[in-house]
Amino acid sequence: MSWLELAATTLDNEYVLLRPIVAEDRAAVRSIAMDPDIWRFFVSRVETDADFEAFFDATLADHTDGTRVVYLVFDKRDGRVAGSMSYGNLAERDGRMEIGWSWLGRDFRGKGMNRWAKYLLLQHAFERLGAERVEFKTDRLNEQARSALRNIGAREEGTLRSFNPMPGGRRRDAVFFSVLRAEWPRIKEQLERQPKITPG
């Protein structure tokens, strides 16, 4: 089976559940996505109803045509949609993929959900799909995301300057991080020793 076929499955542990997005998720995603703080460092903005419809349609299209494998993240404590993360840039022949397009609603940040969702995605990438390299990229200005990537054990590799345009006319410098297959056992053990989901 291809990576696309293997990736389109539900991933979960006692804290979070990730499952592929479907059209019927529109209302649940909208209920948490209309927060401008989410999109501050994204390459698109969600500020109006029209913005959200365009964003959701594009996300669903990427998932349907295999450009990305888009997951919704659920808080297993109450079953609510918490946000979304994706596999993308799937270079199966080279054993390389990206985890990104990550966001969480306001109620779900700073509680360990990002860490456990990334744990599941990394585990699936290395242990089921057989990836050799998983990469991440973020805006040079997004110190919170850079810190979060370091906290899950990803190594900062460098900055690609003027990588892409951003809303408002700025061009983003993209900072790349990665985790390699040989590093995964150590990182997995470290993540499993960290504190669990924070109540609230």
Image: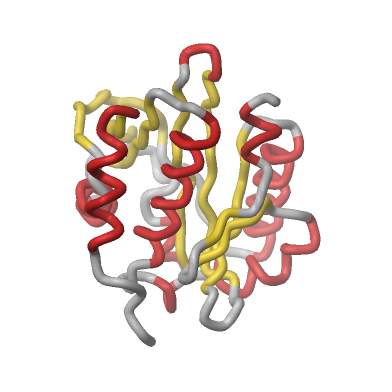
- The single residue placed furthest to the top in the displayed view is 93
Residue 131 drawn at (x, y percent):
46, 27
Say which quarter of the image contains residue 2: top right
> Which residue: 67% across, 47% down?
9
Vertical position of residue 45 compared to residue 171: above or below: below
- The single residue placed furthest to the right in the displayed view is 24
Vertical position of residue 62 compared to residue 3: above or below: below
- Quadrant for the C terminus, please: bottom left
> Which residue: 37% across, 32% down?
135
Residue 191 drawn at (x, y percent):
28, 55
Q: How does the figure colour the protein chain or chains?
A: secondary structure
**Side of 14 relative to 25 (left or right):** left
**Side of 95 relative to 139 (left or right):** right
Could one spot residue 173 in this view of the protein? no
- The single residue placed furthest to the bottom in the displayed view is 200
Residue 16 drawn at (x, y percent):
50, 66
Could one spot residue 116 in this view of the protein? yes
Q: How many marks?
A: 0
Say which quarter of the image contains residue 79: bottom right
Pick the residue in front: 191 or 88. 191
Residue 62 drawn at (x, y percent):
67, 37
> Which residue: 65% across, 46% down?
59
- Quadrant for the N terminus, please: top right
Vertical position of residue 47 compared to residue 87: above or below: below
Vertical position of residue 85 compared to residue 198: above or below: above
Pick the residue in front: 60 or 52. 60
> Which residue: 34% across, 36% down?
137
